[in-house]
Amino acid sequence: AHFSIEALFITVKFDRSTLRGALPVDTNNDILPDVIDYDYQLVGLWNCGEVFDDDTVKILGKPPPDGGTTCQWTADDAIQVNLPKEFDVEVGDSLFLRQDRIFTIPRPQENEYSMAASGGILVSMPLALLPPNISFNGNVQIDECSPVL
């Protein structure tokens, strides 16, 4: 996880694509998921407490209307934590997931199913900026009557 360069948000990246909060359901008690319940999939802006544990939500900040912290999926493997103007989370803090909430996309044709994601990640500094690409353009010759700007 890392801050944006402006500290407006934190990007949390998973190592695999997820179901974005949708839940696998075992309908025949064989331990393997049979269907995915997309009613639980998180879309748009949502309360970060849906995915992160209570201690993490305390440092990220309250959701609207009492606060300004929201979360959103930016890809199947990335959550953006949108921060208010004043926040408590710092570089080096840990963000922990809520149990049994985030699952990877199953691959039934390969008999691959995942347990729920668990654990946490440290918040790091923003990614390094790319060096600027400077280019000049204009006339290569000027005479005494040409404007100089």
Image (tube, rainbow, N blue to C red):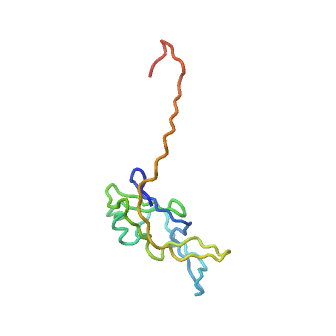
Instruction: Report the number of discs.
Output: 0
Residue drawn at point x = 45 percent, y = 61 percent: 1
User: Which image quadrant for residue 36?
Assistant: bottom right
Residue drawn at point x = 51 percent, y = 59 percent: 74
Question: Looking at the image, is 43 positioned above or below residue 35?
Answer: above
Residue farthest along the top direction in this orientation: 144
Residue nearest the viewer, comparing 114 with 131: 131
Question: Looking at the image, is 93 positioned above or below residue 141?
Answer: below
Residue 66 lies left or right of residue 103; in this view the side is: left
Residue farthest along the right direction in this orientation: 109
Picture coordinates of residue 136, whole percent (x, y): 51, 30
Residue nearest the viewer, comparing 145 with 1: 1
Residue 45 lies left or right of residue 28; in this view the side is: left
Picture coordinates of residue 62, whole percent (x, y): 34, 65
Residue drawn at point x = 41 percent, y = 61 percent: 123
Residue nearest the viewer, comparing 101 with 39: 101
Question: Looking at the image, is 149 positioned above or below residue 85?
Answer: above
Identify the image quadrant of the C terminus: top left
Residue drawn at point x = 32 percent, y = 64 percent: 66
Question: Looking at the image, is 96 positioned above or below residue 8?
Answer: below
